[in-house]
Image: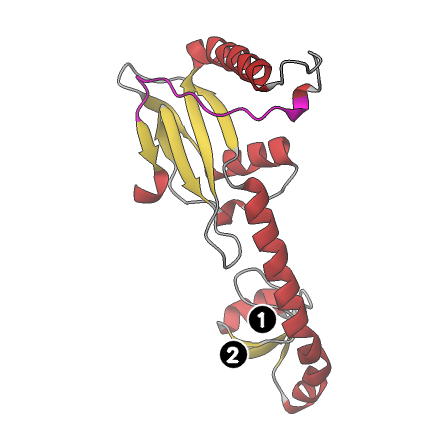
């Protein structure tokens, strides 16, 4: 069925676009929710007003997604999990958990469907791609640490971050400063496997 979108619909289009969708999707969701109208002659006449705004809205949305992509690129997220001696998790870190933690850390709420669909099942550092905007896809680092080692791991990172921050200060700079100004880089456990979830 051809319909005219009256609102932006994720993965389908923005308001003002004419799209073809399954009849059931149109009748059971788009039309009852007021997200679209059937593409009949009367509706097509009303389309011109929406279409004049569609290009600008789409460009604004794309720019916003690219901005979010730049903000989250390189973000590190940490998870404590039970694991076997070989590093296999008893369970996994899901896209929903990654999305929730990313929101907690950055304040940016990303739909979990934009995150690589592969569940993470091993201890180590995983580079996870996020599908946002038309620019190069951002990647976040998901670091999974054994549950029993997590507190020591995070404490060691804090010490390393403080030492790095102190070493970066000019000799005549006052000590102290705002802790939130330091940027912490990941020092991975040499025994933990490195994985790229995009390749799984």
Q: Is residue 105 above or below residue 29?
A: above
Q: Is residue 150 above or below residue 29?
A: above
Q: Is residue 141 magenta?
A: no
**Looking at the image, which is closer to me, 174 or 35?**
174
Q: Callout 1: 10 Å neighbours few (<14), some, many (20+)?
A: some
Residue at 59%, 61% (x, y): give it: 62
- Magenta residue span: 180-193
Location of the C terminus (image quadrant): top left
**Image-quadrant location for residue 19:** bottom right
Colour convention of the picture: secondary structure
**Looking at the image, which is closer to me, 67 or 125?**
67
Instruction: Give the side of residue 161 with respect to residue 84, left or right.
Output: right
Residue at 44%, 26% (x, y): give it: 143
Q: Are marks 1 and 2 in contact (CB under 8 Å)?
A: yes
What x and y, as percent, mark residue 60? 66, 63
Q: Is residue 25 above or below residue 154?
A: below
**Residue 6 seen anywhere in this rendered image of the structure:** no
Q: Is residue 53 above or below residue 190?
A: below
Q: Which mark is residue 27?
A: 1
Q: According to the image, label 2 marks what residue? A: 1
Q: How many marks?
A: 2
What x and y, as percent, mark residue 152? 47, 8
**Which is the main secondary structure of the residues drawn in magenta?**
loop
Residue at 36%, 25% (x, y): give it: 124
Residue at 66%, 79% (x, y): give it: 51
Q: Which mark is residue 43?
A: none
**Image-quadrant location for residue 47:** bottom right
Q: Nearer the viewer, mark 1 or mark 2?
A: 2
């Amino acid at each position: 069925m051809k319909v005219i979108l009256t609102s932006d619909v994720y993965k389908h289009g923005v308001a003002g676009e004419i799209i073809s969708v399954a009849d059931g999707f149109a009748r059971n969701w788009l039309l009852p929710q007021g997200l679209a109208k059937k593409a009949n002659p009367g509706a097509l006449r009303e389309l011109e007003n929406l279409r004049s705004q569609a290009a600008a809205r789409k460009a604004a949305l794309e720019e916003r997604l690219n901005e979010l992509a730049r903000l989250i690129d390189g973000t590190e997220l940490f998870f404590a999990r039970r694991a076997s001696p070989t590093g296999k998790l008893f369970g996994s870190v899901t896209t929903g958990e990654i999305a929730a933690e990313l929101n907690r850390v950055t304040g940016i709420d990303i739909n979990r469907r934009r995150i690589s669909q592969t569940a993470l099942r091993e201890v180590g550092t995983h580079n996870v791609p996020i599908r946002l905007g038309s620019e190069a896809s951002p990647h976040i680092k998901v670091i999974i640490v054994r549950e029993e080692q997590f507190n020591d791991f995070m404490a060691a990172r804090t010490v390393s971050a403080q030492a790095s921050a102190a070493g970066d200060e000019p000799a005549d700079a006052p000590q102290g400063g705002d802790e939130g100004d330091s940027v912490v880089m990941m020092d991975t456990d040499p025994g933990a496997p490195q994985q790229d979830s995009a390749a799984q």
